Image (cartoon, rainbow, N blue to C red):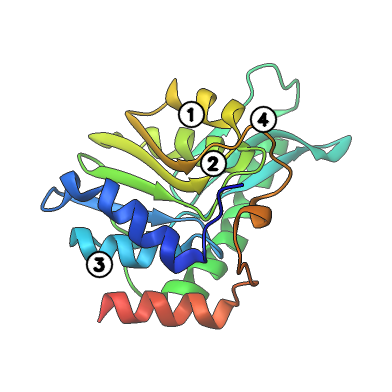
Amino acid sequence: MEMLQNREEAAQLLAERLEKYRGRKGVVLAIPRGGVPVAAPIARRLGMPLEIALSKKIGHPANSEFAIGSVSLESVIVDARADVPPTYIEAQVQRIRESLQQKYKLFMGNRRHVDLAGRVVIIVDDGIATGKTLLAIVELVQKQQPQQVVVAVPVAPFAAIDKLRSMVDEVVCLLIPPFFQSVGQFYRKFEQVSDEEVIKLLQQHAA
């Protein structure tokens, strides 16, 4: 079975594959927390700002686990088939946005959000399991009219990659194993990433 040493090795290998974007007007969007140690070296190598992609699902009023949409700091997607009152959606969006803003402030401090319009947006995570989070982020990003959307991940199951390929301009994935259980099984070292580590990496990049 092919394995990656750690997130640092994954970052270097992905950065090589993304070299053609160096010098372009772009932004690297990391999905916290695990995506940040992968995204930071990529952003450094490509000379792009590093941002975090925060999103949260909107749960159905009858079953909070059942997602009927997603919210980011800038945009909202709602499943057209979800038969719920608009007032419920509005209240949920406001509640979720407030919690996302707190999280953004924790990670990014008082830095202003990079406008994605007209930029090459490279979305990075440390791997994809089901792909639900990433698919929602792609949809939310596309509403902001970027020039190009690229997804870069070290490892993912074929089904998720196949779905993403139909949605974005390019998908860069190092390993697409035939038997996939979890992201961690394809790393020799796959430790939890702490909030402190994320903050440190983001501060170093901004400096």
Q: Which residue is mark 3?
A: 44
**Tag 2: residue type?**
Leu
Q: Nearer the viewer, mark 2 or mark 4?
A: 2
Q: Is residue 57 left or right of residue 14?
A: right
Q: Are marks 2 and 4 in contact (CB under 8 Å)?
A: no
Q: Which residue is mark 1?
A: 164
- The quadrant of the picture occupied by the C terminus is bottom left
Where is residue 11 shown, x and y percent of the image? 39, 60
Q: Are marks 1 and 2 in contact (CB under 8 Å)?
A: yes
Q: Which residue is mark 4?
A: 86
Q: Is residue 33 left or right of residue 50?
A: right
Residue 13 figure quarter: bottom left
Residue 115 shows in the view: no
Residue 129 figure quarter: top right
How far apart are labels 3 and 2 at the CA level?
Answer: 22 Å
**Tag 3: residue type?**
Arg
Q: Secondary structure at mark 2?
A: helix
Above or below for 19 versus 40? above
How far apart are labels 1 and 4 at the CA level?
Answer: 29 Å
Q: Are marks 1 and 3 in contact (CB under 8 Å)?
A: no
Q: Is residue 73 left or right of residue 206?
A: right
